[in-house]
Image: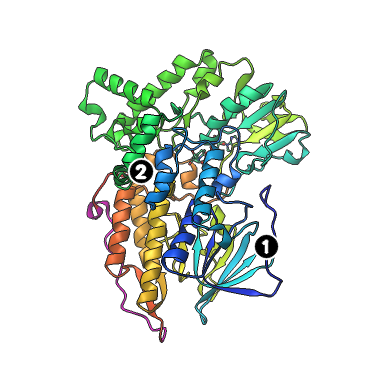
Amino acid sequence: MPEGATLRSTKPAGDVTELDALVIGAGFAGLYQLLCLRDRLGMKVRVVEAGDGVGGTWYWNRYPGARCDSESHSYSYYFSKELLEEWEWSERYPQHPEIVRYLNFVADKFELKRDIQFGTRVTAARYDAEANKWNVETATGDRFRVTYLITAVGCLSTTNTPKFPGLDSFKGDWYHTGQWPHDGVDLTGKRVGQIGTGSTGIQAAPVIAAQAKHLTIFQRTANYSVPANNHPLSAEFKKEVRDNHEEIRKVIQSTPNGHPFRISERNVFDVGDEERAEIYEEFWKVGGLRFRASFQDIVSNKEANDTAAEFIKNKIRSVVKDPKTAALLTDIDHPYSTKRPPIDTGYFETFNRDNVDLVDVKSAPIKAITPKGVLLENGEEYELDIIVCATGFDAMTGPLLNIDIQGRDGLALRDVWAAGPQTYLGLQVAGFPNMFTITGPGSPSVLCNMPVAIEQHVEWITDCVSDLREKGIATIETTTESMEKWITHVNEAANATLMPFAKHTWYFGANVPGKPRVFMPYAGGMTRYRLICKNVAENGYEGFKLSDAEDGSALPFLPAGDFTLAATVPGPGV
Ligand code: N01
């Protein structure tokens, strides 16, 4: 059980709560799904949440330096004009506490908490075909019987701590960034070791270095990072955002990655070397994920990507004073943006501090954790007081597979996904009627600004449930053929990018030993995906089997359409 959760039951054992829908998780997705089903459709709904407060991923990820890599004015719900007018962000990239405050503000404004059961972890969900109901159980003995089961469990909520031999023998304290203690950790005067240099590690290192006596950063894979250029938002900018919500909404809902800027249509080799360098410099100054918007083909053309990669490596070399450290930091084995591109506040500058060392654990991997600290295969041992594992997540599938979900005839989701996740549109799995997976594998999710992806999924599910209820349809359930067609397209979309060049990423599940290597998110772009989902619904839920509420008979089935990239304009992808 993640630290901080106080599980509690609200029901005497044996009682079953009957609901129209149960939503698992009270993050961005669960909150909005509750609002839509309860207030728009008038359904009896409950959200069950393991944490003791709202926030989902943000409830747990409160490590030093935790902040959002999406710009605050786009990392917001856009469904309510009033909400947009009432809330004001303070920084370009909001810190963890401000995001949690925002989500509490939303939950309070729409009176959502009265229908959220906190401190309750869902352990099992089983479909009863005869009753057409889902039976849901929690770790604390609650039982629910519901028509619709909606998972809003997040993509990055199951932490991944490598099984380092001897971890339990460590005499100091160790923490995973994704389960950071809610009271914080006092790093003053401590020798800290940080394992991991992904987006989290890159955010955390400068803040840890500023507090700790000494920080040793254990790097296995060197990473690109672009300065966030974070700053407090000016009164002018806040006004501009307030006056232009509609315009911003149009941009975030029509760009492939859901961010509040458009990607240039220019290609890298449309311009000469000098002009290209000037353009990179200009985008570098703007900072953050906007750097990727400098040219269209950075994520699809290797030669084009090489120019961006070299530009960033030169920037790293210009910042990091020690040539050996700079060489390690620029020994990057994948094209830029094929792993989730981190953005930072003073990450590379951190290596110029006297109290920070970089240790290469690619050439000499971590052999074990000893009572004193970290031991490498080459025999070097690093004495530490605190170990910080910034080692990522069992992404996308982990949170769902941690629940014992069984569909028709006891079909286990774990078995269906034994060789990797299979879904139709990232929204449904064959054999699991009336179950919807918000930002599930096969949807753009993590390749998109999350709230944008979430709003689209929640609204699609809400419209779908509304249709089912109005038209007297008892079940909606995708088919194996629809999933196969969709997976073919998901792979096609990934192969049209450079992402397959970085096979060791969590996008492929490669960070968790034994996890099937399957590219999980949909890289065809949010714009294209939004259109596909809209067409599927408008064409009578192509690719889904529907059954009549009166007698349970099957309604006419429309097979899934053509999901090749050519047939699903517009492009491009991420
Ligand atoms: O996790 P990661 P993360 N020995 O998996 C290393 C989102 N996010 O938490 O690359 C040594 O990317 C591992 O090394 P390698 C964002 O989507 C969002 O940083 O596998 N090292 C890597 O360096 C992001 O992509 C925000 O060789 C080991 C690191 O641990 C996602 O979360 C902020 C190791 C893990 O990197 C995950 O990022 C932060 C071992 N045995 C994160 N095992 C926002 O702004 C693992 N590593 C919203």
**Eyeballing the image, is 76 above or below 228?**
below
Tag 2: residue type? Asn
The answer to which quarter of the image holds residue 65 is top right
Q: Relative to residue 486, is residue 316 drawn left or right?
A: right
* Mark 1 Cα shell of 10 Å, populated few (<14), some (14-19), many (≥20): some
Residue 369 colored in magenta in the image: no
What amino acid is at disc 1? Ala
Instruction: Determine if the magenta segment contains residue 565.
Output: yes
The picture places residue 397, in percent across and down from the top left corner, at: 52, 54
Total labels drawn:
2
Q: Name the residue under label 2.
A: 257
Residue at screen point 52% across, 12% down = 321
**Position of 462 relative to 235 (above/below):** below
The one of 137 and 302 positioned closer to us in this rendering: 137
User: Marks 2/1: CA distance?
Assistant: 37 Å
Measured as percent of width and height from the top left, residue 538 is found at: 27, 66
Q: Is mark 2 on a helix, strand or loop?
A: loop
Residue 7 horizontal side relative to residue 33, left or right:
right
- Tell me the residue that label 1 is attached to: 139
**Residue under the image location 62 percent in, 22 percent down:** 210
Q: In this view, does 359 lie to the left or right of 171?
A: left
Q: In the image, which residues are magenta? A: 551-568
**Left or right of residue 188: residue 73:** left
Query: Are dots 2 and 1 in contact, CB under 8 Å?
Result: no
User: Within the image, what quadrant is residue 461 found in?
Assistant: bottom left
